């Protein structure tokens, strides 16, 4: 990322919100499935409703994965650009991160 540009939102926060939204969708689907199972609907109708809802959940899951992948790609390209613009600083951050990881792993 260029030093003067500001990201519009914290990428980790946006990703966390997306995951929270997906969790809510899964909970809603589970509740819907429980309600459908408790009704006296015919087997064919029940099966069709479950398949439709599972299809919707699958589509939302794919959208979430695609959003996460695009966010990761954006972060990687920003990090790469920063490392090219400021190689010494990037090397310092990498060394610091390695040292911290070494300390954390060494304590175990």
Image (cartoon, helix red, strand yellow):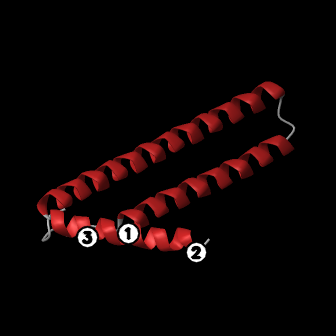
Residue occupied by mark 2: 107
Residue occupied by mark 3: 92
C-alpha distance separating marks 2 and 1: 16 Å
Total numbered circles: 3
Q: Residue at x 46, y 68 (%)?
A: 101
Dot 1, how many residues are within 10 Å of its Cα: few (below 14), some (14-19), or many (20+)? few
Mark 1 or mark 3, earlier in chain:
3
Give SS at disc 2: loop
Location of residue 32 in the rendering, given as x and y in whole percent from the top left corner: 72, 48
Location of residue 8 in the rendering, given as x and y in whole percent from the top left corner: 26, 67
Tell whether label 2 touches label 3 (CB within 8 Å).
Answer: no
Q: Is residue 7 visible?
A: no
Dot 3, how many residues are within 10 Å of its Cα: few (below 14), some (14-19), or many (20+)? few
C-alpha distance separating marks 3 and 2: 23 Å
Give SS at disc 3: helix
**Disc nearest the viewer among 3 and 2:** 2
Please name whichever residue, 5 or 78, is drawn nearer the observer in this view of the structure: 78
Residue occupied by mark 1: 97
| Name of the residue lying farthest toward the top | 44
Tell whether label 1 touches label 2 (CB within 8 Å).
Answer: no
Q: Is residue 88 above or below residue 70?
A: below
């Amino acid at each position: 990322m260029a030093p003067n540009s500001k990201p519009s939102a914290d990428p980790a926060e946006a990703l966390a919100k997306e995951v929270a939204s997906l969790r809510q969708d899964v909970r809603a689907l589970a509740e819907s499935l429980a309600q459908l199972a408790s009704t006296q609907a015919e087997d064919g109708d029940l099966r069709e409703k479950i398949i439709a809802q599972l299809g919707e959940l699958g589509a939302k899951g794919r959208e979430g994965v695609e959003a996460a992948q695009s966010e990761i790609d954006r972060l990687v390209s920003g990090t790469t650009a920063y490392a090219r613009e400021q190689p010494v600083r990037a090397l310092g951050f990498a060394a610091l991160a390695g040292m911290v990881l070494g300390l954390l792993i060494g304590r175990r």
